[in-house]
Amino acid sequence: MTVNPLTTLRDRCSPARPARPSVPHRYGQPLVLSTHAAITAALAAANHDVLIASTQCTAGNEPLGMLRRIDHENLRRGVRYRVLFPDRARTVPALALQLGSLAMAGAEVRTAPDVPTDATVVDEAVAMLPFELPDSRSGDVAVFHLPSVVSTVVELFEQVWPSAVSLMASDVPDRAGLTERERELLRLLSVGCTDESAAARLGVSVRTVRRTMSGIMNRLGARSRFQAGIKAADRGWLVRRP
């Protein structure tokens, strides 16, 4: 479930006060951005590191979570990037290719079953969050400089990061589903076949079976073979194609 960072900040900083539309203004009068150019300018000021957390699973045009040319430029000049997306992003070809390209450029990209919020943090000094109030416009982004706000957003990120699974450029599929051999391998393993017997049934080496299974797990962001089977089934990947 997505966490509203402004609600989290309100609960931690002012637990006795009821929520009001003016909640963000208690945390340092944020600058509100609604243009991609302004967000790009904020990223261009990075000197050390950038954290990106996104709940999105599309290669869309959302202000926060989208991947920009400035990200690659920052990586080239030595800015460290840690990028966190949902596991489902691995199976969206356009987005997976963007994430793979970012990983190839040097970013640390990971995926998790659930990402708590959309957020971008620059140099642990500036936090950009969705600005979601009744009178705000869709796509508005609140920019905070107050240390207590920034540290809370970083803490949310760090709670998920250690258990998230790394996504390497080599993990990115050139298709959304499985090949017939991959599908048959999952089916054989799901009914109790060992690597050796699955290899014999498929006419491949045990090493190929293990390498193929590792690739499927990485593609799905699965922590185990059992979880890979569940995720593949959820996506309808185990259904035989005509």
Image: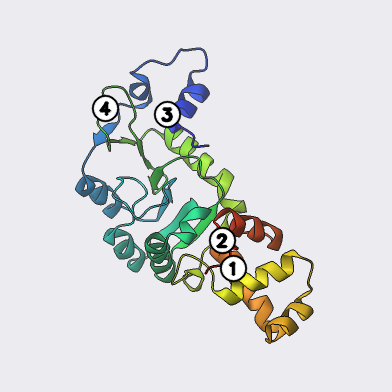
- Residue identifier under label 1: 216
The reply, left or right, for residue 210 in relation to residue 96 is: right
Q: Are marks 2 and 1 in contact (CB under 8 Å)?
A: yes
- At which x and y percent is residue 135? 26, 22
Q: Nearer the viewer's eye, disc 4 or disc 1?
A: 1
N-terminal of the pair, mark 2 or mark 3, is: 3
Q: Nearer the viewer's eye, disc 3 or disc 4?
A: 4
Q: Nearer the viewer's eye, disc 1 or disc 3?
A: 1
- At which x and y percent is residue 109? 48, 60
Write the residue at 67% across / 57% down: 227
Q: Return the residue nearer the eye: 17 or 240.
A: 240
- Residue identifier under label 3: 6
N-terminal of the pair, mark 4 or mark 1, is: 4
| Spatial CA span between label 2 and label 1 | 6 Å
| Spatial CA span between label 2 and label 3 | 31 Å
Given the image, on which type of amino acid does mark 2 rest? Leu
- At which x and y percent is residue 229? 66, 60
Q: Nearer the viewer's eye, disc 4 or disc 2?
A: 2
Q: Which disc number belongs to residue 220?
A: 2
Q: Which disc number belongs to residue 40?
A: none
Q: Secondary structure at mark 2?
A: helix
Q: Which disc number belongs to residue 136?
A: 4
